[in-house]
Amino acid sequence: MTETPRKTDPGEETPAGDNDGGSAGPEDPPAAASEPAAPPEAANDSDAPEARAPQDGDPAGGGAEPAGPDSGEADSGEADSGETGAPALTEEQQRIVDLEIEVAELKDRALRAMADADNARKRAARDVADSRKYGATGLARDILTVADNLGRALEAVPDLPREEDENLFNLRAGVDMTLQEMLQALERHGVKKVTPETGERFDHNRHQAMFEVPTDELAPGAVAQVVQDGYVIHDRLLRPALVGVARKPPEEPAPEEAAEVPEDAAEPPEENTGESDAA
């Protein structure tokens, strides 16, 4: 009996194996065709590497390096400067400050130089005055030696009246006049005689002790004798006066007293006589 083929609807699928010769039916569409195609932006994002999630120790901002201590100090310095509000000096202002410092230093140097010049001027004026005042010190000291010799000559010549020896009288008068004129010339240049008085207190600044004179009439340390007069030139000592200084004389030893015989001294023994023996 011949089988009549069954009509199939167009939408009905033909089961596999029903066709003769094992021919496959119409091919199934690929699975990918049923899914919609991804947009190009999504495809690009998928190709990019995945962003690493920030860890606990990482700073905010992902790959930013951690700020060091210097950056913190700089930030604090900027903050302080911003708080104080002191503007930084410009080049012109800094130049003005440097010039003011330089002017102050130059002014100090000028004042010191003026002070040194004034001191040098005063010192030079003092030296000139001293040279005028004491310049004749060496000459006066030499002339005093001649004056001393003239004085010794007057002491050696006896002071006789003119009637006895007129020539000797005139010689003595001439030497005395020469000595007086010499002393007057020295006095005009500030040289004066210093003659200590007997009993005057010894002065170490104007007197020179030559010897000691034991005496009870003067206090110890007083001038007892003048050997040579002294001289001064203005307020400086030219030559000290040579003097003898009094001192207390040594005490005389007390006379030795006669040795006293003690009352209880032993008496010499009495001689035995014949009468006493007979008795």
Image (spheres, rainbow, N blue to C red):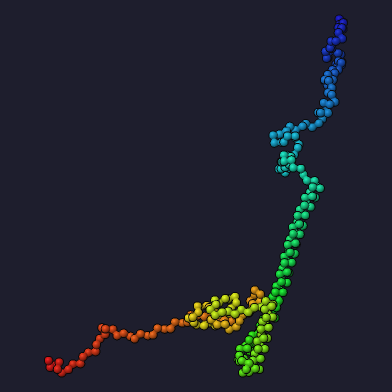
Where 34 sits versus 4, above or below?
A: below
Q: Quadrant of residue 10?
A: top right
Of residue 29 and residue 180, the one placed in the foreground of this image is 180
Where 16 sits versus 261, above or below?
A: above
**Residue 111 seen in the figure:** yes
Position of residue 182 measured from the top left corner of the image (x, y, whole percent) = 68, 83
Of residue 55 and residue 274, the one placed in the foreground of this image is 274
Q: Residue furthest front?
A: 163
Q: Quadrant of the C terminus?
A: bottom left
Q: Quadrant of the N terminus?
A: top right
Q: Quadrant of residue 124?
A: bottom right
The residue lying at 84 percent from left, 26 percent from top is 41
Q: How many circles with numbers are drawn on the protein?
A: 0
Position of residue 50 measured from the top left corner of the image (x, y, whole percent) = 77, 31
Of residue 14 and residue 206, the one placed in the foreground of this image is 206
Position of residue 84 measured from the top left corner of the image (x, y, whole percent) = 72, 41
Along the horizontal axis of the image, is 52 left or right of 148? right
Along the horizontal axis of the image, is 146 left or right of 13? left
The residue lying at 71 percent from left, 71 percent from top is 129
Where 76 sits versus 275, above or below?
A: above
